[in-house]
């Protein structure tokens, strides 16, 4: 499938969907999270906070009653409208890190791969709680910093990456009831575990999405299939996924 770029880039601030002939391990992981959570939004009103390129809103709209996607970037919202419009989706240019007042509260909020971009995490979470109905659900994903083995993230847009323990502490300060799961590779692979430790492994991330070598390696290492895990989350999960009761 081909998408209009609408002036935005896959530069680490937001994730663009793959085009025809492309492969992206990270996009596959992000898409999986939306697919997983879509089972919990049937016939509900949903807000996707920091919707980025809008592909997640499209996935959620297949089961949700209505979806509102918001993002602070005007070009991103234009991209969303050009590529992922649907009768039950609305896209608005709103900065979620600032106060905003929707006309009605939502049954569900999702904010995927956003919290690590936010300086004021506590204010951000309080804002989300305020716009979700009492008894509603809030789903949050963020990269698991433990998988970097203590190294700083290479993403310049990330200001608050968290490991499992810190993420849990943050959530405990805002929610009396929540569960943290992990997004991990669908199958363990001895070959992948060996390759991940080799010096050239990180160079693969710099290959273009349409690189033939990237496609072969991704397929051989089974790196585009994911599952939800409930144990060994600290070390096995690429992303942390929280389900919070408002």
Image: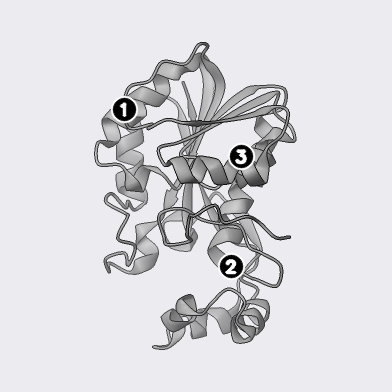
Secondary element under disc 1, as helix, strand or loop, is loop
Instruction: List x then y, in percent, for residue 32.
Output: 63, 52
For the N terminus, the image quarter is: bottom right
Judging depth in this view, the residue of 32 and 105 nearest the camera is 105
Q: Which mark is residue 98?
A: 1
Q: Earlier in the sequence, mark 2 or mark 1?
A: 2
Q: Is residue 5 above or below residue 78?
A: below
Could one spot residue 180 in this view of the protein?
Answer: no
Residue 167 relative to residue 92: left or right: left
Query: For the point 54% across and 52% down, which residue is it?
Result: 6
Instruction: Return the residue at label 3.
Output: 81
Snapshot quadrant of residue 131: top left
Q: Which mark is residue 24?
A: 2
Query: For the point 41% across and 56% down, which residue is it?
Result: 234
Q: Are marks 3 and 2 in contact (CB under 8 Å)?
A: no
Q: Earlier in the sequence, mark 3 or mark 1?
A: 3
Q: Is residue 23 above or below residue 81?
A: below
Q: Earlier in the sequence, mark 3 or mark 2?
A: 2
Instruction: List x then y, in percent, for residue 84.
Output: 66, 43
Query: For the point 32% across and 53% down, which residue is it?
Result: 161
Secondary element under disc 3, as helix, strand or loop, is helix
Secondary element under disc 2, as helix, strand or loop, is loop
Judging depth in this view, the residue of 8 and 70 nearest the camera is 8
Residue 200 relative to residue 133: left or right: left
Instruction: List x then y, in percent, for residue 132.
Output: 48, 19
Mark whose residue sits in front, 3 or 1: 3
Q: How is the image coloured?
A: one colour
Q: CA distance from mark 3 to mark 2?
A: 23 Å
Q: CA distance from mark 2 to mark 1?
A: 32 Å
Judging depth in this view, the residue of 3 and 110 nearest the camera is 3
Residue 136 relative to residue 150: left or right: right
């Amino acid at each position: 499938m081909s998408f209009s770029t609408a002036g935005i880039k896959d530069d680490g601030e937001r994730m663009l969907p793959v085009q025809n002939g492309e492969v992206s391990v990270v996009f596959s992981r992000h898409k999986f999270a939306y697919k997983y959570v879509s089972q919990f939004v049937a016939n509900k009103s949903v807000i996707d906070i920091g919707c980025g390129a809008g592909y997640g809103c499209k996935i959620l709209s297949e089961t949700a009653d209505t979806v509102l996607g918001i993002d602070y970037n005007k070009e991103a919202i234009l991209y969303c409208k050009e590529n992922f419009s649907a009768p039950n989706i609305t896209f608005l240019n709103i900065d979620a890190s600032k106060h905003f007042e929707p006309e009605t509260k939502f049954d569900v909020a999702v904010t995927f791969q956003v919290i690590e971009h936010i300086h004021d995490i506590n204010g951000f979470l309080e804002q989300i709680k305020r716009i979700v109905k009492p008894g509603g659900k809030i789903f949050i994903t963020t990269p698991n910093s433990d998988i970097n083995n203590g190294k700083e993230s290479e993403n310049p847009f990330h200001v608050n990456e968290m490991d499992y323990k810190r993420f849990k502490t943050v959530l405990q300060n805002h929610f009396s009831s929540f569960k943290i799961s992990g997004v991990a590779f669908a199958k363990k692979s001895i070959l992948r575990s060996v390759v991940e430790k080799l010096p050239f492994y990180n160079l693969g991330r710099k290959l273009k999405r349409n690189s033939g070598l990237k496609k072969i390696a991704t397929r051989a290492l089974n790196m585009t299939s994911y599952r939800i895990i409930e144990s060994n989350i600290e070390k096995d999960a690429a992303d942390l996924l929280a389900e919070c009761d408002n």
